Each structure stands twice: as structure tokens, then as C-alpha cells.
């Protein structure tokens, strides 16, 4: 065999690593060299995982729960998830229609691999979480973007989404609250999209991972009224400060969940047994109500500071991200990000990674001292540049 035949798969063409993780790694490398960097890049709470959750994991180890579990998850956790869906989201959900995955990303990946054939189209409102189009492409699909705008609070336009539907459309992905904009979509608009999907036999994928981090709006699950076409994705990562535990979950039509489990059985098998017991403690334990107020205070500080710097930033309704117009720093968001990292020691993500060139995403999932320090450094760097 000649070296010229040793090629990677064509599906990887144009596929890069997560820009969020890349920028975070660069910032942490500067920290390791002794620099003080204000990191507004990663999408994870800075809180520690609550003690009762950690203790549940320790108890699981001591009880010998360290072997394989059912591919779709331990029965107790699937029952708790089904109960949560019914009580909190109004979704009539049987435990048999629940799958536990290795993080929310695997839930999305399993789903797209289960429903998308080569050439199928998947509609995604933009700006979007950067993993959505990447995973659509890995499944052989074609991402189709429908723009939302800061002037409208980045709300979706159901008519625009419906207009983008074609005979090749297999799914629509909605993330509400949205990463990276913080928009919480209006329930009537979600239902309008769901109705259009139902009328045409198109799956509606509802990513609700930020559902508890909401300030000024009401979240809505389309599966409540449109269960036949809706697949609901979630995880314990953001709500319970468990990003590293890697537990996601999903519910949807039985054939979809069964297909997702079949795919998972040939890849990771079950999610980590110990983390499943920790997730059970999270879902059945006390809520982290104080986190919402803490994030609200951080949001107000971050958004107010960015606007004071002349970087127009709409007020997010949920999640913990602010999407700022940084074209006054540099028309290129990549150059703007590099300027802030090198001159202000502030790390944030170029908006082009999310389908928003000319903008940058600032995560306020960090303490107010860091936010204030980072904003002041940005002010000083911009003053020096003139």
C-alpha cells in the first residue's frame, strides 16, 4: 500500500475541533505560563457539583455499581427522567422511551445518525451552537440555516423556517434557551414550527439543556402538544454543574429512541454507571434555585459592561451567554478575539463559530470579580488602541 492511499474519510472535510474548546485551551495555556486571563469562553458553570450528588457517586462505587448497565441507562434513572418530563415539561413519557447518553452531545449525535440519510436537510436557526451543523454533516446531512436577528431579540420566525422546508427536510433543531444568543423562543412560535413539522412529517428536535437558566421568559416543550414528531434532548450538565460527568438524556417516539439505543450499543454502550447514579441524585434532590439569581446578576454586569464599551449586546433571556457586536474592534471576529486575548488577556469565542461573523460570544458563567476585571481590561486595551 502506498502512502497516498492512506487518507482520512471525506466526511471530515471542513470539520475542525470545537472552537469553544480550542479558545479555552489557548487561554488556559496562557494561565499555565503565569498570565492572568479572564476566560469568558467555556459554556460551563463555575460552581462545584453539589455535595449530595458527589456523595451519591461515592456510594455507588462502594456499593459495587461499577459494571455495565443497560445500554439505555439504569431503570431508576430512566424512571426519574420520565417523571421529570411529565411533571416539569408536560410530556407524557414512559421510561421505555427514555435513553441516557454520554452527555448531551451524544444524544444529538445518536439522534442524527438514527434519522438522517445522506442528502437529507436539517434546518437550524442561526446563530447556532457550533456542534449542530458539524454533527449533521457527520451523519451525511446538509445543514440549512435560517437567520435570526439581534433587532428581534434573536427570536425565530416560524414562517421563515416553514419556507425553508423542502421534500428533503428531515428535521428542525431548536435550542431554547439558545446558545449562543440567550434567546428564549416564544411558545406560540415553537408550536407554529411544531405544527409545520407535524403537517409535513418532519422531526422537531428540541434541545432544552438550559431550561432552568431562564430570567425573563417562559420555556416551552413542543413534545407537550406534538409528541409524534418531537424529540426532546436534555442533560444534567448545566443545571447541576455536572459538565464533566457526561450524562445526557432524551425522549421521543419509541422507534427513534430504540434506534438511538442501537447506535449507542455499537459505540459507547452505557453511559458511565457511577455518573448515572450521580444524575439520579441530581434529578431527585433539591433544585439549585440560587444559581438562576447568581447568573442574572452576572448577566446584568456583563451585558451592561459590553454595551458601555460600545459593543451592542441584546439582553439574553436565558442560558449564560451574551452575543456582542464586535465589529467596532475589528470587522473580523477572529481578529477581534485575537486582539482581546493578546492585548487584554480576555478570552471569548468568535461568533463565526456560531454562524454570527462580526460578533463574539461572552460566557458569564464565572464570578463577578472576573467579569468586572475582564471588562476593565477590555476598556483599557481599547483606550490604548485609540
Image (tube, helix red, strand yellow):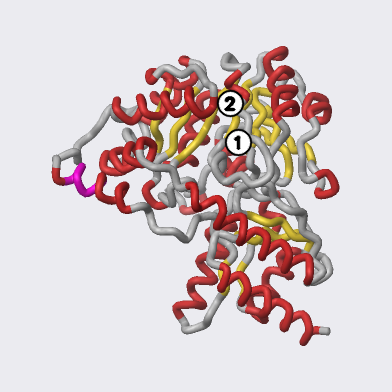
Mark 2 element type: loop
Looking at the image, which is closer to me, 263 or 200? Answer: 200
Quarter of the picture holding the C terminus: bottom right
The tag on residue 162 is: none
Where is residue 380 shown, x and y percent of the image? 72, 83
Q: Is residue 311 left or right of residue 363?
A: right
**Quadrant in the rendering for residue 219:** top right
Which residue is pictured at 46% across the width and 39% down the height?
Answer: 235
Q: Are the residues flagged by discs 2 and 1 in contact, CB closer than 8 Å? A: yes
Which residue is pictured at 77% across the width and 44% down the height?
Answer: 154
Looking at the image, which is closer to me, 61 or 219? Answer: 219
Looking at the image, which is closer to me, 354 or 46? Answer: 46
Q: Classify 223 as above or below 324.
A: above
Q: Classify 191 as above or below 301.
A: above
Q: Which residue is mark 2?
A: 116
Q: Is residue 70 left or right of residue 255?
A: left
- Circle nearer the N terminus (2, 1): 2
Residue 59, magenta (yes or no): yes
Which residue is pictured at 83% across the width and 69% down the height?
Answer: 328
**Quadrant in the rendering for residue 56:** top left
Q: Which residue is mark 1?
A: 136
Where is residue 172 shown, x and y percent of the image? 67, 28
The residues colored magenta run 57-61
Residue 342, magenta (yes or no): no
Amino acid at each position: 500500500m502506498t502512502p497516498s492511499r492512506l487518507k482520512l474519510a471525506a466526511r471530515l472535510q471542513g470539520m475542525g475541533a470545537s472552537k469553544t474548546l480550542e479558545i479555552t485551551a489557548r487561554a488556559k495555556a496562557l494561565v499555565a505560563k503565569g498570565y492572568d486571563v479572564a476566560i469568558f469562553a467555556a459554556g460551563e458553570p463555575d460552581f462545584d457539583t453539589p455535595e449530595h450528588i458527589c456523595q451519591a457517586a461515592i456510594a455507588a462505587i462502594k456499593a459495587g455499581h461499577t459494571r455495565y448497565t443497560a445500554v439505555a441507562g439504569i431503570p431508576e434513572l430512566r424512571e426519574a427522567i420520565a417523571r421529570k418530563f411529565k411533571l416539569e415539561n408536560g410530556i407524557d413519557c414512559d421510561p421505555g422511551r427514555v435513553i441516557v447518553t454520554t452527555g448531551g452531545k451524544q444524544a444529538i449525535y445518536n439522534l442524527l445518525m438514527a434519522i438522517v440519510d445522506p442528502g437529507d436537510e436539517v434546518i437550524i436557526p442561526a446563530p447556532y451552537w457550533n456542534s449542530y451543523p458539524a454533527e449533521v454533516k457527520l451523519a451525511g446531512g446538509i445543514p440549512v440555516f435560517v437567520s435570526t436577528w439581534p433587532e428581534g431579540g434573536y427570536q425565530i420566525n416560524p414562517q421563515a423556517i416553514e419556507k425553508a422546508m423542502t421534500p428533503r427536510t428531515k428535521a428542525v433543531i431548536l435550542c431554547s434557551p439558545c446558545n449562543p444568543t440567550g434567546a428564549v423562543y416564544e411558545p406560540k412560535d415553537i408550536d407554529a414550527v411544531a405544527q409545520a413539522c407535524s403537517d409535513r412529517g418532519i422531526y422537531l428536535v428540541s434541545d432544552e439543556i438550559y431550561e432552568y437558566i431562564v430570567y425573563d421568559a417562559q420555556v416551552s416543550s413542543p413534545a407537550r402538544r406534538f409528541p409524534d414528531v418531537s424529540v426532546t434532548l436534555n442533560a444534567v450538565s448545566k443545571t447541576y454543574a455536572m459538565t464533566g460527568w457526561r450524562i445526557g438524556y432524551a425522549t421521543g417516539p419509541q422507534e427513534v429512541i430504540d434506534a438511538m439505543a442501537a447506535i449507542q450499543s455499537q459505540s459507547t454502550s452505557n453511559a458511565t454507571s457511577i455518573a448515572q447514579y450521580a444524575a439520579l441524585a441530581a434529578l431527585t434532590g433539591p433544585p439549585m434555585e440560587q444559581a438562576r439569581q447568581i447568573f442574572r446578576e452576572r448577566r446584568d454586569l456583563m451585558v451592561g459592561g459590553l454595551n458601555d464599551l460600545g459593543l451592542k449586546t441584546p439582553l439574553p433571556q436565558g442560558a449564560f451567554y451574551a452575543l456582542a457586536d464586535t465589529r467596532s474592534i475589528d470587522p473580523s471576529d477572529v481578529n477581534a478575539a485575537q486582539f482581546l486575548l493578546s492585548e487584554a488577556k480576555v478570552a471569548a469565542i468568535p461568533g463565526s463559530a456560531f454562524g454570527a461573523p462580526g460578533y463574539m460570544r461572552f460566557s458569564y458563567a464565572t464570578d463577578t470579580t472576573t467579569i468586572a476585571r475582564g471588562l476593565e481590561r477590555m476598556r483599557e486595551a481599547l483606550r490604548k488602541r485609540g
